Image: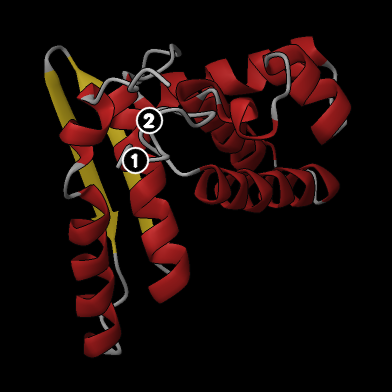
Amino acid sequence: MLDSRVAGLIAGVANHEARRIYDARVERARRALTEDDSAELGRQLCDAILLELWRARSITGFEAFAQDVIGLDAQRARSLAEGAAAEQGTVLDRLPDVAVALYLRSEVALIERCPDAKVSIRVEGDRLQMALSLPLAPPARVAEAVTAIGRSASGLLRVLLEKPRPK
């Protein structure tokens, strides 16, 4: 049976999972805009570009995402994203499919099991660097979150390399 994540809006990620992350991140970005938190808004916009997150809701591109979804001038949004990327030492280009899928799958696993945890992914040359920030307690919840990330990542290569079968 063909894995539905192959033909999804974001390769390697189930559409319902991609939409869940999109919705959570849009909420964070809007909150940051309302609270005039430029640093957090910049980080959310930077991640949106790295992940091309707008694909999860079939938005046409970053400019439409910034203006029509977040409510921010596209030029200012790009500037905030560039500032956050520079602060993180990250190139502001879309991550490779495997990194996007791993990032989103990991974030979904954390939202479900340990919402206080955070994941970040960077590409440096030919290396993918993934970092987890986890609370120390409760330990069972933390262990469950890490286990869930492992389960969500299993089979990722197969999903990304699987070719859709002819109908």
Numbered disc 2: secondary structure: loop
Q: Please name the residue shown 35% across and 35% down the image.
A: 101
For the residue pair 145 and 45, the one nearer the viewer reads as 145
Q: Is residue 74 above or below residue 112?
A: above
In the rendered structure, the answer to whether residue 110 lies left or right of residue 124 reads: right
Residue contact at pointers 2 and 1, CB within 8 angstroms: yes
Give the label on residue 3, or none: 1
Q: Please name the residue shown 78% across and 14% down the image.
A: 74
Amino acid tagged 2: Val
Residue 75 position within the rendered picture, expressed as x and y whole percent measured from the top left: 76, 9
In the rendered structure, the answer to whether residue 57 lies left or right of residue 121 reads: right
Q: Please name the residue shown 24% across and 78% down the image.
A: 144
Q: Would you call the spot at circle 1 few (<14 residues within 10 Å), some (14-19), or many (20 or more)?
A: some
Amino acid tagged 1: Asp
Q: Can residue 138 be seen by looking at this rendering?
A: yes
Residue 86 position within the rendered picture, expressed as x and y whole percent measured from the top left: 43, 18
- Mark pair 2, 1: CA separation: 6 Å
